[in-house]
Amino acid sequence: MSNFADFSTLLDSLYYTSSTKAKTRLLCEYLTNTPDPDRGWAIAVLSGTLQLEFFSRSTVKNLMLTHCDPVLFAMSYDYVGEMSETVAHMWPTPKTIELDCNRSLPSLNDIITEFSNTPKNAIPECLASYLDRFTPSQRWALVKLGTRGLRVGVSARLVKNILAEFASVSTIQVSDIETLWHGVSPPYTELLTWLEGKTPKPDVSDRIVFHPVMLAHPVTEAELANIDFNEWVAEYKYDGIRVQIVATSHGIGMFSRTGDDIAHSFPDVVELWQNTGVYGVFDGELLAFSDVDIGTFNQLQQRLNKKKPTKKLMNEIPCGIIIYDCLALGSGTQRCSLTELPLSERQTKLTEVLTPVIQHRIRLSPTITITSKTQCQRVRDEICERSGQRIEGLMLKRKTSLYMSGRPKGQWVKYKRDPMLVDAVIMYAQRGHGKRSSFYSDYTFGCWGTNEIGERVLLPIGKAYSGFSDAELHELDKWVRKHTIGRFGPVKEVAKELVFEVAFDSVHTSKRHKSGIALRFPRIHRIRWDKPANEADELTRLVGMIIQ
Amino acid sequence: MSTSTILEPHPDTWIEVRSAGIYCIPADVYIDPMQPVERALITHGHADHARGGHQRVWATLETITIMQQRYGIEHALLQTVVTFGEEINLTPEAEHPVFMCLYPAGHILGSAQIKLTYQGVSIVFAGDYKRTPDPSCPAFIPIDCDVFVTEATFALPVFNHPPIQDEIHKLILSLTRFPERCHLVGAYALGKCQRVILGLRQYGYHKPIYLHGALLKLCQTYREFGYDLGECVPVSEVDDYHSLAGEIVLAPPSALTDRWSRKLPDVLTCMASGWMQIRARTKQKRAELPLIISDHCDWQELLDTLDEIRPTEVWITHGREDALMHACNNMGIHARALRLIGYEDENNE
């Protein structure tokens, strides 16, 4: 028999264990000792394929607030830096319930079934009844599970490696599991029993299945100097999102880089593809389009995460796709895999198939011939400039590269434009979360502008919590503690004395900040311990860089 | 329990916070000063409370022994041993003398609360203390007083320290699951280390326990005071380190990740500390097995203690004072934060 306590013990052990070998042993032990469907649900939870969100973080928070002193909750949350854990420890254990926990604990399957079938308005009550019965560790596991926020240092990739290890049939390799992975679904009973040699291999040939994509490494200038350009081909690096089209005679799937099916958000693109009548697995970039050109990432962003976009939105921001690779052609038994062919041959076949059907919003990514490093730089800078940052650099691909999932070395590299930089002054700091809990690691910074009465003041332009080393984090944390001049709840205001060189990808107008602008992907590039704050940049400099 | 809320003379007028620490004006004496001073009262032997170089020191025999061991026999010119419950006049010549009395604090060997009484008004400095039973020192005794000075190291409702036997059980379970790995437990040399050893012995673990060199002297001190730690072997006396597979080795936390630990076979890092309740803290310490073993009160212990003593005022020395002040307000006890710096290192207990 297995219950939720076994599951939460597993999560705890995995969370704290750092060695892969020990993690493998822990998970294999669990898989051996736990019956279906619990063990399969655990696999789904660990690899992030359990698509259900049982309750939102705000549901949990509101429930907690009705069970404790809100002031103490706020202080605790600020200190712990993580909501699930704060709730796990702060939830008051009712005195009336006997803590004979193992006798009546539900299984993982019971929990998943119950939360999937409970109407939304009854969720808080259901959640509360479990929190009452659970230990802090089990509460943490439940809240993490329910809000899909679980991270215990086990990647989907590691899960597959461990499954291969778990397999009692010695011929089963990780690659076998990978090809099946997206064709099977939680609780993975057919997969697990196959690994144990009890059932035949699941047949997924007629399922619409995501194929793990091939990724690129960033390239340094030094590496670029060593590239023999005769062996490489270049393409533009579009600023959209990576998608995979899987077109079969049964239907069309459109997957994000991580394998989430996002077809429902882009029915316009799916329909365009449907009309081409082309079957196969295609790799490309999803972009917003205008009548004449491709759109900006900002426009595309308004289409993302819309479960059911309105006609109006689709008319305002039509989307399309630029295809650059092809993993398979044809459908069903006719399908033929191209992943073992070199890139140049895949591109020839892709061009043959797509040329007759290309149109404004379904395009082929053009290839560019590059002969030298200097030319490479020039082409990159020109195209970024000319496209108004809609193209963010170049992709360089080895002509002989096979299509390999993951990030194989020396095959594909990305050569992005240099980030833009601004010198800004740190204004506020907040404690970090997760690994950085209790360190002041989230910084709000600003540039010089003028306020309503014409004084020169700092106006916040953004927030960053990355780009520095652990050693720098410790120094910054110390600096913040020493230079605090005010407190607004968890936020500390600091003396306006320290300058960050902030790197970012682009500037947009924003109503959220007093400064009227927002930076895309800001990160700390350098800490300018040496630079006086009054020499930081003026806001006007950033306003001039806004992408319309 | 005091019924009147008017304290005369109010301790505000005769106790002050100076850069060297808390100072009692009429007795001309500091409590746990952080710099060398003329006259010092010491609650316990942890290095942030007991420093060397004072002219005159009052403390328990255990604390003075620990100080002698750390700072030399002559760490202070004049060392006065005080027994629990003994009343001492700190200013025999004064018209209004200040009386001192020590009571057990339940924190570590020799730890004491210090009660000062001046013109009938009393203040108790609890120092660091805890309420959970600890075989390595006598239990905390709640003392009637007008002002109770408390620490607030774990003063947030998320801190709820489990019984030590649960944590020892976790360690033993891990030894069964990973019998080929050397279980290296990080524990502070004074107090935590001996508590873990005694906890293991109470659990029924009678194999030798291996010790880092920095722990040896203080373990010997505990033995001299009559605590039976069982068989402990210095790691330096082990011929073949491979024989430490599946054994328990204790080391100060600083040794967990340094070169010293690399000679041990397939180390599984454990850390014994009250902070281990917070997952991220465990990760930050790179511990794989957190053992929530604390020398301090958890949240409920703090509240229960205040409720039991019901002082007119609570003063909070260091830690998470905001939350404890808030709780005092809810209990109708006037509270203020002294915000002493120097006692707290966020990462240490």
Image: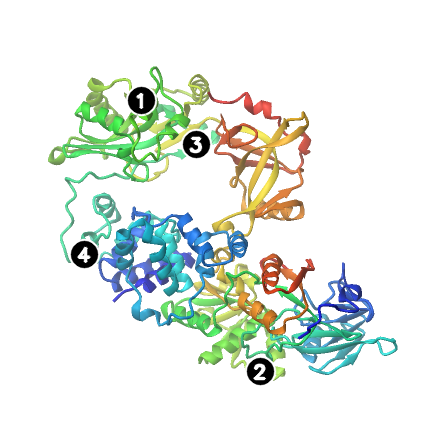
Which residue lies under the disc numbered 3? A219
Which residue lies under the disc numbered 4? A193
Whether residue A9 is visible to the viewer of this picture, yes or no, is yes
Disc 1 to disc 3, C-alpha distance? 38 Å
In this rendering, the label closer to the viewer, 4 or 1: 1
Q: Residue furthest bottom?
A: B226
Q: Quadrant of residue A319?
A: top left
**Discs 2 and 4 share one subunit:** no
Above-or-below relation of B94 to B262: below
**Discs 3 and 2 share one subunit:** no
Disc 4 to disc 1, C-alpha distance? 48 Å
Which secondary structure, mark 2?
Answer: loop
Tell me which label, 1 or 3, sits earlier in the chain. Answer: 3
**Discs 3 and 4 share one subunit:** yes
Which secondary structure, mark 4?
Answer: helix
Return the residue nearer the eye: A172 or A14. A14
**Mark 4: amino acid:** Thr
**Mark 1: amino acid:** Asn
Which residue lies under the disc numbered 2? B227
Q: Which mark is residue A315?
A: 1
